[in-house]
Every structure is written in C-alpha cells, then in structure tokens.
Amino acid sequence: MSKKPWGGRFPHETDELAEKFTASIAFDKRLYRYDIEGSIAYCEALAKAQIIPHHEKEKIIQALKEIEQEIEEGNFPFSAQREDIHMHIEQRLVEKIGAIGGKLHTGRSRNDQIALDMRLYVKDELADILNRVTVLQTSLVVMADKHIEVIMPGYTHLRKAQPILLAHHMMAYYEMFKRDRERLADALKRIDCLPLGSGALAGTPYPIDREYLAERLGFTAISQNSIDAVSDRDFVVEFLAHCALLMMHLSRLCEELIIWSSPEFGFLSLPQDFCTGSSIMPQKANPDVLELIRAKTGRVYGSLVTILTVLKALPLAYNKDLQEDKEPLFDTVDTVTNALEIMALFLTKTEVNEEKMGTAASEEYTNATDLADYLTKKGIPFREAHQITGKAVQYAEKKGEGLGDLSLDELRSFSPSFAEDVFDYIRIEASVNHRQSLGGTARSRVIEQIKKAKKELS
Ligand code: ARG
C-alpha cells in the first residue's frame, strides 16, 4: 500500500517521476505562514464545535507553532514526496504529536485550504504593494515640488509640442499611480472573502462556525457558495491585471527617464550607482535598472495571460490546474515589489538639468499655438489663425529664427492684428501660465495639484 496520507486506495507507491511532476512544494512553501495561521484558526473552530477536546486543540496549536518556527529557522525537512505545503505541515504534525495530529483535517479539504492560503497571501502582498506605490508617489511629488520653476518641452509624437512644467509631467504619473492604488484597493473588496469551511466542494457536514473563522482570520466576507469558493481564482486575475497596469505605467516612466537622460536630450543625470558599465566600451554608463523594469513589465503581462489561460474552460470545481496559479502570482509580486522600491529610490537620486530643459522648451516653435491663440483673442477664427501662424513658422524657419525673434513688421506682414504685446504673449513662461484650465500646466494650477497630492498622501 502507498504510504501517502491519501494512500489507502493505492496498491503501490507513486511513480517517482509523477511524484516530482505533481509536487508543488518547491514554490508553495512560500505560503507556510498562511497555512499555519489557517490551521490554527480551523483547529479552534473544531474545538468550538466539540469535534476535538480542548487539550487536543492546545496540543495541535502548540505543535503548529513549533513547525512554523522550524520552517523559519530552516530546520524543516522538505521533500517532493510530501507534495505540497499542506501535506508537509500535516505530516510533520503527526510526526510530532501522533494520531491527534490527524484530527486537524476533519471536514477540511486541501481545496478550501489552498483557496484560503492564497487569499491571505494576496491580501498581505496587496497591502504591501499599496504602501510601496505611496512611497513612489511621494518621490514624484517631491520631485515636482523641488522643480516647480522648471519649464520643459511637452511632447506629442515624441516631437516638441508645447512648453509645460516638469512638475506637471511628473504629476501626470502621480495620477496614474493613484488610479493603480484605487484599482488594487477596490480588488481587495473581493479578495477579502473567507473560503474555508467549503470542504472539497460541497461544504462540510461538521458544525464549523464560519463566522468565527472569518473574524478570527480577518475576513470581512464569507463565500456564499462552496463550489465557487474552491473553484475560482478570479481574485488572482484581478490582482495580476491591476499589477499589469501598474507595470505598464512604470515602464512608460522608465522609457522617459531613459530618453531624457540620453546625451541627445541631456535633461537628466541618472544616479551613477544605479547605472552599469559596458564590458567593451569604457565610456558607457547604461540605465540598466530602468531597462529591466521596462522589460519586466512583459513577464507580468505573461503571468496575467498564464492564469487567464489556466482558468479558461476549466470545469468546476477544483482541478489540479489551479496549482499553476502560484508561480505567476509569486513572480508578479516579486517583480512589482522590487520595481516599485527601486523606482522610488531612483527618482530621489535623479538630477534635473534645469537649463537644458528650459532651452529645449523654447526651441522648435513650441510657442506656435500661443501665436495662433494671440490672433484668436484678437477676433480671428482659430482655423485662420492656425494658417497665418503656419506661414509665420515657415518664414522663421527659413531665416533660422524663433517666432519671438521676428520683428513686429515681419509678423504684421502675415496679419495686421499683431501688435507689440505679442512678444510677451509668446514667451514660454507666458505660454505655460496661460494654461489656467483645471489640470493645466499653469504654475498656479500645478501647485494646486501638488497641494492636493500632499493631502492625499498624508
Ligand atoms: N497544491 C494544491 C494546489 O496548489 C493544493 C490543493 C490540492 N488539492 C487536491 N485535491 N489535489 O492547488
């Protein structure tokens, strides 16, 4: 007969290759704390329901705590023969306290047990990620605040478009990460639901107090259908989807920092202790950290697609396929956690070349829209003002000058509506400050945005 805890009906031992193939301990040992936390609460519920006596409950809980310590101290025997973290802990429990240990699994299944572990784990990691996003947002606000005077070119199509404040640009990322936080926080509502007490799929015949379990384990909701509780991993999908968006935002920020710090732009100096060299080209300092965050976005997308594909067309209730939810989830948590931490630090150490940004902001006719707006304010329909300005740009370009370098007579040759005040109107400082619309780049508006952000962060 097989010596497995479930070996009663098996005449032989499991094939070694099959055993290795089906084992998940290599990665699910990461869940040990949640597994033990769930087992302790479940043991209390068994005692409460008078399924086990008080002294046995005490014994089991004491042994579970010792097992936790063994794992933490690295003295715990792991082996593929014991399949997963649940079996490891249960078998160790029996080793330690004998047959009483075998009572813990009464009315419980690994199916509701793993659903519980996963939810506890995601809840914890989600809270940690939320904190890290806040730290990153703080770095962005600090950078915006520090450089509130700095004007830079704003881009569309990666061509200079209109002057903006660097602070305005940084605060755009603040808003993106704010939505990422909101999405994750919202997902928590659905993650925060107790599956334990669902048994294998049909519920449990024992009078387990699920309300007690929920309270004891810190869940605000209790699953209302035992089949759903052990079958679905939509909460993992949701979490990964929000992480994918978060990484997408991070990758865009990385890309911009890479471009801006290139010698061709020269807007930023990256912290040298966060850059790496080339094995052949002695002059190089490469933005590897940023490139890696940008690239790791791909693995998070991959994880999302993995879990979606695992779940697709999976019949209810539990199937071993669900074991494949763990590695993509763990990998995503590690990736996002590390990326957020390093990015927050990176930003605080990045230096801004204010002069270079300012000069670049006034080049290449970034004030052309302002020239058209000037004419529009004088009563010329915008479409016409656009045409007139286009011609003025063409003329200035041929002369190799900016719009502000043209004489009033030259400007008036395109429209008699130009007057002396046009020159003030099209200065880049004025261009920025004209944009007083809510959310616009005018300094007073950006200061408002920063103020609001500081309040949100505190
Ligand atoms: N290791 C399994 C998983 O991660 C635990 C649940 C196993 N349940 C079962 N009936 N085989 O999904």
Image (tube, grey):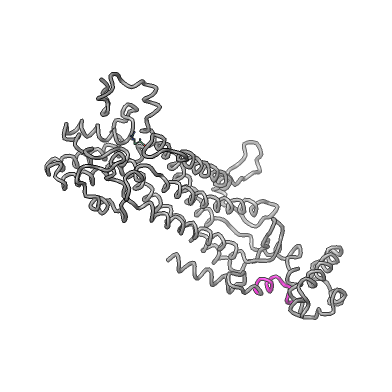
Q: Position of residue 419 (x, y in %)?
A: 80, 81
> In the rendered picture of this protein, how many numbered marks are placed on residues?
0
Viewport quadrant of the C terminus? bottom left
For the point 43% across and 52% down, the residue is 129
Ligand 1 is found in which quarter of the picture? top left
**Which segment did they paint magenta?**
423-433
Quadrant in the rendering for residue 295: top right
Residue 203 drawn at (x, y percent): 27, 43
Q: Where in the figure is residue 403, as x and y percent of width and height?
A: 79, 69
Q: Image point 36% across, 20% down: which residue?
A: 15
Camera-nearest residue between 115 and 432: 115
Q: Is residue 28 magenta?
A: no
Vertical order, 232 against 160 (above or below): above
- Give the main secondary structure, helix, strand or loop, of the magenta stretch: helix
From what the image shows, is residue 321 above or below residue 400? Answer: above
Question: On screen, 318 above or below 2?
Answer: below
Which quadrant is home to the N terminus? top left
- The front one of 105 and 426 is 105
Left of 389 or right of it: where is 353? left
Residue at position x 49%, y 49% in the image = 241
Asked if residue 32 shows in the view, the reply is no
Tell me the residue at 77%/80% (across/down): 379
Q: Is residue 429 magenta?
A: yes
Residue 155 in picture, x, y percent from top left: 68, 60
